[in-house]
Amino acid sequence: MTSTSRLSLKGIAERRAITEAVVVPMLQGIRDRTVCSTYERLEPDAASRVYTLLSPDTASFRMSSAETKLIPHSTNLQNMAKKVSKIDPLYRVRDIFIPDEGYTFVACDYKGAEALLRGAYSDDWAFVDKLLQGADVHTELGCFLFGVDKITPLQRDITKTIAYASQYRATIRTITLNLNKEADATGIYFSESDVAALHKKLLQMHPLERWWELTRLELEKNKGILTNCFGYRRKFHDPEPDNQLKDGLSFYPQSSIACLMNRALPLVHAWLEQADQVDAQLLLQIHDELLFQCRPECVTDLVRVVTPKMEHPFPIHGRTLAVPVEWKQGPSWGFMKEFNHKEMV
Protein backbone atom coordinates (compact mmCIF):
# COMPACT_ATOMS: atom_id res chain seq x y z
CA MET A 1 0.00 0.00 0.00
CA THR A 2 1.39 3.40 -0.97
CA SER A 3 0.42 6.95 -0.13
CA THR A 4 0.90 10.11 -2.11
CA SER A 5 0.69 13.79 -1.23
CA ARG A 6 -1.49 16.10 -3.30
CA LEU A 7 -0.07 19.33 -4.68
CA SER A 8 -1.93 22.58 -4.26
CA LEU A 9 -2.04 24.26 -7.65
CA LYS A 10 -2.87 27.55 -5.97
CA GLY A 11 0.07 27.13 -3.59
CA ILE A 12 2.45 26.39 -6.45
CA ALA A 13 1.28 29.45 -8.38
CA GLU A 14 1.67 31.68 -5.32
CA ARG A 15 5.21 30.47 -4.59
CA ARG A 16 6.28 30.81 -8.20
CA ALA A 17 4.97 34.37 -8.19
CA ILE A 18 6.94 35.16 -5.04
CA THR A 19 10.08 33.64 -6.55
CA GLU A 20 9.75 35.66 -9.73
CA ALA A 21 8.90 38.89 -7.89
CA VAL A 22 11.43 38.68 -5.05
CA VAL A 23 14.11 36.02 -5.41
CA VAL A 24 14.99 36.44 -9.10
CA PRO A 25 15.47 40.25 -8.92
CA MET A 26 17.44 39.86 -5.69
CA LEU A 27 19.88 37.41 -7.31
CA GLN A 28 20.12 39.68 -10.35
CA GLY A 29 20.88 42.65 -8.10
CA ILE A 30 23.66 40.82 -6.26
CA ARG A 31 25.35 39.96 -9.55
CA ASP A 32 24.92 43.49 -10.88
CA ARG A 33 26.51 45.03 -7.78
CA THR A 34 29.40 42.58 -7.97
CA VAL A 35 30.18 43.27 -11.62
CA CYS A 36 29.81 47.05 -11.10
CA SER A 37 32.33 46.98 -8.26
CA THR A 38 34.68 44.95 -10.47
CA TYR A 39 34.60 47.54 -13.26
CA GLU A 40 35.01 50.37 -10.75
CA ARG A 41 38.24 48.99 -9.30
CA LEU A 42 39.83 48.37 -12.70
CA GLU A 43 41.73 51.63 -13.09
CA PRO A 44 44.49 51.23 -15.71
CA ASP A 45 47.59 53.42 -15.87
CA ALA A 46 48.66 55.57 -18.82
CA ALA A 47 49.78 52.43 -20.68
CA SER A 48 46.33 50.83 -20.17
CA ARG A 49 47.72 48.28 -17.72
CA VAL A 50 46.49 47.01 -14.35
CA TYR A 51 48.59 45.13 -11.82
CA THR A 52 48.26 42.74 -8.90
CA LEU A 53 50.27 41.43 -5.96
CA LEU A 54 50.63 37.65 -5.80
CA SER A 55 51.38 36.14 -2.41
CA PRO A 56 51.52 32.51 -1.10
CA ASP A 57 49.49 33.39 1.98
CA THR A 58 46.51 31.07 1.65
CA ALA A 59 45.89 28.04 3.86
CA SER A 60 46.38 25.69 0.89
CA PHE A 61 49.62 27.53 -0.07
CA ARG A 62 48.03 28.76 -3.29
CA MET A 63 48.91 32.23 -4.51
CA SER A 64 46.42 34.94 -3.66
CA SER A 65 45.91 38.12 -5.67
CA ALA A 66 45.36 41.52 -4.06
CA GLU A 67 45.60 45.27 -4.33
CA THR A 68 48.69 46.80 -2.74
CA LYS A 69 49.66 50.38 -1.93
CA LEU A 70 53.16 49.56 -3.17
CA ILE A 71 51.94 49.19 -6.77
CA PRO A 72 49.65 51.87 -8.26
CA HIS A 73 46.67 50.67 -10.34
CA SER A 74 46.70 47.26 -8.68
CA THR A 75 43.72 45.08 -7.74
CA ASN A 76 42.72 41.45 -7.29
CA LEU A 77 42.91 39.92 -10.78
CA GLN A 78 42.11 36.34 -9.79
CA ASN A 79 38.43 37.03 -9.13
CA MET A 80 37.42 38.31 -12.55
CA ALA A 81 34.01 36.76 -13.28
CA LYS A 82 34.01 33.77 -15.62
CA LYS A 83 31.08 31.40 -15.07
CA VAL A 84 28.49 34.16 -14.67
CA SER A 85 29.53 35.66 -18.01
CA LYS A 86 27.37 33.05 -19.73
CA ILE A 87 24.24 34.75 -18.38
CA ASP A 88 24.67 38.28 -19.72
CA PRO A 89 27.26 40.09 -21.91
CA LEU A 90 27.50 42.74 -19.19
CA TYR A 91 29.25 40.20 -16.96
CA ARG A 92 31.98 39.38 -19.48
CA VAL A 93 34.63 41.23 -17.50
CA ARG A 94 37.50 39.19 -18.90
CA ASP A 95 36.75 40.36 -22.45
CA ILE A 96 38.22 43.80 -21.69
CA PHE A 97 41.68 42.31 -21.01
CA ILE A 98 43.61 42.22 -24.30
CA PRO A 99 47.27 41.56 -25.22
CA ASP A 100 49.67 44.09 -26.65
CA GLU A 101 49.46 44.71 -30.39
CA GLY A 102 51.06 41.86 -32.32
CA TYR A 103 50.61 39.39 -29.45
CA THR A 104 48.03 36.77 -28.55
CA PHE A 105 46.89 35.51 -25.18
CA VAL A 106 47.86 31.91 -24.40
CA ALA A 107 46.83 30.08 -21.23
CA CYS A 108 47.96 26.79 -19.76
CA ASP A 109 46.04 25.16 -16.92
CA TYR A 110 45.81 21.82 -15.18
CA LYS A 111 43.01 19.77 -16.69
CA GLY A 112 40.66 18.30 -14.10
CA ALA A 113 43.36 18.58 -11.46
CA GLU A 114 41.06 18.72 -8.45
CA ALA A 115 38.98 15.76 -9.63
CA LEU A 116 42.12 13.75 -10.43
CA LEU A 117 43.66 14.40 -7.03
CA ARG A 118 40.42 13.71 -5.20
CA GLY A 119 40.28 10.37 -7.00
CA ALA A 120 43.89 9.58 -6.15
CA TYR A 121 43.58 10.54 -2.48
CA SER A 122 40.40 8.46 -2.14
CA ASP A 123 42.01 5.51 -3.98
CA ASP A 124 39.36 5.72 -6.71
CA TRP A 125 41.90 4.77 -9.36
CA ALA A 126 39.28 3.57 -11.84
CA PHE A 127 37.96 7.14 -11.87
CA VAL A 128 41.50 8.55 -12.21
CA ASP A 129 42.27 6.29 -15.15
CA LYS A 130 39.06 7.33 -16.92
CA LEU A 131 40.00 10.99 -16.50
CA LEU A 132 43.52 10.42 -17.83
CA GLN A 133 42.09 8.56 -20.84
CA GLY A 134 39.95 11.57 -21.68
CA ALA A 135 36.57 10.14 -20.70
CA ASP A 136 33.77 12.62 -20.02
CA VAL A 137 33.15 11.48 -16.45
CA HIS A 138 30.60 14.23 -15.79
CA THR A 139 28.43 13.06 -18.68
CA GLU A 140 28.77 9.44 -17.57
CA LEU A 141 27.83 10.33 -14.00
CA GLY A 142 25.00 12.58 -15.18
CA CYS A 143 23.45 9.81 -17.26
CA PHE A 144 23.57 7.56 -14.18
CA LEU A 145 22.12 10.20 -11.84
CA PHE A 146 19.27 11.16 -14.14
CA GLY A 147 18.66 7.65 -15.49
CA VAL A 148 18.98 8.62 -19.16
CA ASP A 149 21.19 7.71 -22.11
CA LYS A 150 21.97 11.32 -22.98
CA ILE A 151 22.03 14.44 -20.82
CA THR A 152 21.61 18.10 -21.64
CA PRO A 153 24.38 20.68 -21.04
CA LEU A 154 22.35 21.97 -18.09
CA GLN A 155 22.12 18.49 -16.56
CA ARG A 156 25.88 18.16 -16.97
CA ASP A 157 26.44 21.44 -15.10
CA ILE A 158 24.10 20.23 -12.34
CA THR A 159 26.04 16.98 -12.13
CA LYS A 160 29.34 18.85 -11.77
CA THR A 161 27.95 21.03 -8.99
CA ILE A 162 26.73 17.99 -7.06
CA ALA A 163 29.95 16.04 -7.65
CA TYR A 164 32.33 18.82 -6.58
CA ALA A 165 30.34 19.69 -3.48
CA SER A 166 29.87 16.05 -2.51
CA GLN A 167 33.53 15.15 -2.69
CA TYR A 168 34.18 17.46 0.26
CA ARG A 169 31.25 16.12 2.26
CA ALA A 170 28.97 19.09 1.78
CA THR A 171 25.56 18.66 3.37
CA ILE A 172 22.44 18.10 1.29
CA ARG A 173 21.24 21.56 2.31
CA THR A 174 24.48 23.20 1.14
CA ILE A 175 24.38 21.40 -2.22
CA THR A 176 20.73 22.41 -2.63
CA LEU A 177 21.55 26.05 -1.92
CA ASN A 178 24.41 25.99 -4.43
CA LEU A 179 22.17 24.57 -7.15
CA ASN A 180 19.38 27.03 -6.46
CA LYS A 181 21.70 30.05 -6.69
CA GLU A 182 21.28 29.78 -10.47
CA ALA A 183 17.55 28.99 -10.36
CA ASP A 184 16.66 32.32 -11.98
CA ALA A 185 18.88 31.52 -14.96
CA THR A 186 18.26 27.76 -15.25
CA GLY A 187 14.55 27.76 -14.46
CA ILE A 188 15.04 24.72 -12.19
CA TYR A 189 14.46 24.72 -8.45
CA PHE A 190 15.67 21.75 -6.37
CA SER A 191 14.19 20.47 -3.15
CA GLU A 192 16.44 18.85 -0.56
CA SER A 193 14.79 15.49 -1.24
CA ASP A 194 15.63 15.83 -4.96
CA VAL A 195 19.28 16.46 -4.14
CA ALA A 196 19.39 13.69 -1.52
CA ALA A 197 18.26 11.14 -4.12
CA LEU A 198 20.94 12.27 -6.60
CA HIS A 199 23.60 12.34 -3.88
CA LYS A 200 22.77 8.79 -2.83
CA LYS A 201 23.25 7.58 -6.41
CA LEU A 202 26.57 9.43 -6.67
CA LEU A 203 27.95 7.56 -3.64
CA GLN A 204 27.16 4.29 -5.40
CA MET A 205 29.74 5.18 -8.08
CA HIS A 206 32.49 6.73 -5.96
CA PRO A 207 33.98 5.46 -2.62
CA LEU A 208 33.86 8.86 -0.97
CA GLU A 209 32.52 7.64 2.37
CA ARG A 210 35.60 5.49 2.95
CA TRP A 211 37.86 8.49 2.20
CA TRP A 212 35.89 10.67 4.59
CA GLU A 213 36.28 8.12 7.38
CA LEU A 214 40.00 7.60 6.81
CA THR A 215 40.60 11.36 6.83
CA ARG A 216 38.60 11.72 10.04
CA LEU A 217 40.72 9.01 11.69
CA GLU A 218 43.91 10.71 10.46
CA LEU A 219 42.82 14.01 12.00
CA GLU A 220 42.09 12.31 15.31
CA LYS A 221 45.35 10.38 15.31
CA ASN A 222 47.55 13.39 14.50
CA LYS A 223 45.66 15.92 16.64
CA GLY A 224 44.28 17.90 13.72
CA ILE A 225 47.31 17.70 11.42
CA LEU A 226 47.22 16.43 7.83
CA THR A 227 50.11 16.06 5.37
CA ASN A 228 49.68 15.99 1.60
CA CYS A 229 51.66 13.84 -0.82
CA PHE A 230 54.30 16.59 -1.20
CA GLY A 231 54.99 16.68 2.54
CA TYR A 232 53.17 19.95 3.14
CA ARG A 233 51.60 19.87 6.63
CA ARG A 234 48.69 21.87 7.94
CA LYS A 235 47.14 22.15 11.38
CA PHE A 236 43.33 22.45 11.49
CA HIS A 237 42.05 24.48 14.44
CA ASP A 238 38.28 24.44 13.98
CA PRO A 239 36.83 22.91 17.17
CA GLU A 240 33.84 21.50 15.28
CA PRO A 241 34.84 18.00 13.98
CA ASP A 242 32.59 18.18 10.91
CA ASN A 243 34.03 21.52 9.82
CA GLN A 244 37.55 20.28 10.48
CA LEU A 245 36.89 17.22 8.32
CA LYS A 246 35.52 19.30 5.42
CA ASP A 247 38.53 21.59 5.58
CA GLY A 248 40.83 18.56 5.65
CA LEU A 249 39.20 16.94 2.63
CA SER A 250 39.55 20.08 0.52
CA PHE A 251 43.12 20.58 1.78
CA TYR A 252 44.42 17.40 0.13
CA PRO A 253 43.74 18.17 -3.56
CA GLN A 254 43.88 21.96 -3.34
CA SER A 255 47.22 22.09 -1.53
CA SER A 256 48.63 19.48 -3.92
CA ILE A 257 47.67 21.62 -6.93
CA ALA A 258 49.31 24.58 -5.20
CA CYS A 259 52.51 22.57 -4.68
CA LEU A 260 52.55 21.56 -8.35
CA MET A 261 52.02 25.14 -9.50
CA ASN A 262 54.52 26.59 -7.02
CA ARG A 263 57.12 24.17 -8.37
CA ALA A 264 56.38 24.98 -12.02
CA LEU A 265 56.01 28.76 -11.71
CA PRO A 266 59.68 29.65 -10.97
CA LEU A 267 60.89 27.16 -13.59
CA VAL A 268 58.71 28.74 -16.27
CA HIS A 269 59.68 32.26 -15.19
CA ALA A 270 63.41 31.43 -15.23
CA TRP A 271 63.17 29.92 -18.70
CA LEU A 272 61.34 32.94 -20.10
CA GLU A 273 64.02 35.23 -18.66
CA GLN A 274 66.70 33.32 -20.60
CA ALA A 275 64.77 32.43 -23.78
CA ASP A 276 66.00 35.10 -26.20
CA GLN A 277 64.29 33.46 -29.18
CA VAL A 278 60.84 33.27 -27.58
CA ASP A 279 58.94 36.55 -27.35
CA ALA A 280 56.49 35.77 -24.53
CA GLN A 281 55.68 37.14 -21.10
CA LEU A 282 54.07 35.46 -18.12
CA LEU A 283 51.33 37.85 -17.05
CA LEU A 284 49.35 36.17 -14.30
CA GLN A 285 48.72 33.03 -12.29
CA ILE A 286 45.07 32.26 -11.62
CA HIS A 287 44.94 29.30 -9.22
CA ASP A 288 45.83 26.37 -11.52
CA GLU A 289 46.34 28.45 -14.68
CA LEU A 290 49.16 30.51 -16.15
CA LEU A 291 48.29 33.36 -18.54
CA PHE A 292 50.87 34.50 -21.13
CA GLN A 293 51.00 36.97 -23.97
CA CYS A 294 53.07 35.67 -26.84
CA ARG A 295 53.94 36.36 -30.45
CA PRO A 296 51.87 33.93 -32.57
CA GLU A 297 55.00 32.44 -34.15
CA CYS A 298 56.41 31.63 -30.68
CA VAL A 299 53.40 29.71 -29.36
CA THR A 300 54.80 26.33 -30.38
CA ASP A 301 58.07 26.91 -28.51
CA LEU A 302 56.17 28.14 -25.46
CA VAL A 303 53.97 25.04 -25.40
CA ARG A 304 56.89 22.68 -26.02
CA VAL A 305 58.90 23.95 -23.05
CA VAL A 306 56.21 24.85 -20.50
CA THR A 307 54.14 21.65 -20.80
CA PRO A 308 56.70 19.26 -19.25
CA LYS A 309 57.49 21.79 -16.51
CA MET A 310 53.80 21.76 -15.55
CA GLU A 311 53.22 18.02 -16.00
CA HIS A 312 55.76 16.99 -13.39
CA PRO A 313 55.08 13.40 -12.15
CA PHE A 314 54.83 12.80 -8.41
CA PRO A 315 54.16 9.82 -6.10
CA ILE A 316 50.79 9.48 -4.37
CA HIS A 317 49.40 6.45 -2.52
CA GLY A 318 51.91 4.06 -4.06
CA ARG A 319 51.43 5.24 -7.63
CA THR A 320 52.94 7.91 -9.85
CA LEU A 321 50.61 10.56 -11.19
CA ALA A 322 51.13 13.40 -13.65
CA VAL A 323 48.30 15.92 -13.96
CA PRO A 324 47.89 16.85 -17.64
CA VAL A 325 47.55 20.40 -18.90
CA GLU A 326 45.41 21.97 -21.58
CA TRP A 327 46.17 25.06 -23.64
CA LYS A 328 43.93 27.87 -24.88
CA GLN A 329 44.58 30.82 -27.16
CA GLY A 330 42.59 33.93 -28.07
CA PRO A 331 42.43 37.69 -28.71
CA SER A 332 41.17 38.46 -25.19
CA TRP A 333 41.17 36.81 -21.77
CA GLY A 334 37.46 36.20 -22.06
CA PHE A 335 37.53 34.74 -25.57
CA MET A 336 39.98 31.86 -25.65
CA LYS A 337 39.61 28.51 -27.39
CA GLU A 338 41.30 25.25 -26.49
CA PHE A 339 43.72 23.81 -29.04
CA ASN A 340 45.46 20.47 -29.39
CA HIS A 341 48.96 20.98 -28.04
CA LYS A 342 50.13 17.38 -27.91
CA GLU A 343 51.64 17.37 -31.39
CA MET A 344 53.73 20.41 -30.43
CA VAL A 345 55.39 18.77 -27.39
Image: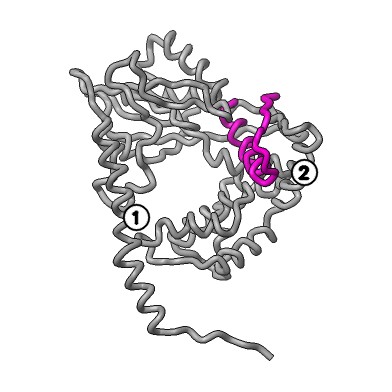
Is residue 255 highlighted in magenta?
yes
* Residue 241 visible within the image: yes
Task: Return the residue nearer the eye: 83 or 11.
Answer: 11
Q: Residue at x 55, y 61 (%)?
A: 142
| C-alpha gap between disc 2 and disc 1 | 39 Å
Q: Amino acid at mark 2?
A: Leu
Disc 2 or 1, which lies upstream in sequence? 1
Residue 128 percent location from the top left of the image:
65, 44
Whole-percent x, y for residue 306 in the image: 49, 23
Label total for image:
2
For residue 195, which numbered disc appears in the image? none
Q: Secondary structure at mark 1?
A: helix
Provide residue 36's location: percent of width, then percent of height.
Answer: 25, 41
Q: Residue at position x 35%, y 48% from top?
A: 84
Q: Nearer the viewer, residue 137 or 343?
A: 137
- Relative placement, left or right, of 53 versus 259 is left
| Viewer-side residue, 87 vs 133 | 87
**In the rendered image, which quarter contains the N terminus?**
bottom right
**Foreground residue, 268 or 11?**
11
Which residue, as the protein is rendered here, is positioned at the far front?
A: 239
Please state which of the two labelled residues, at mark 2 or mark 1, is closer to the viewer: 1
Determine which of the numbered discs, if any, sits on residue 27 in the image: 1
The residue carrying pointer 2 sits among few (fewer than 14), some (14 to 19) or many (20 or more) residues within 10 Å by Cα, namely few
Relative to 55, is 3 above or below?
Answer: below
Question: Residue drawn at (32%, 15%), measured in percent from left and top?
Answer: 71
Q: Give the image quarter of residue 40.
A: top left
Q: Amino acid at mark 1?
A: Leu
Label 2 sits on residue = 214
Question: Does the image show residue 144?
Answer: no
Magenta stretch holds residue 168: no
Which residues lie in the magenta part?
Answer: 231-260
In the figure, 162 relative to 46: above or below? below
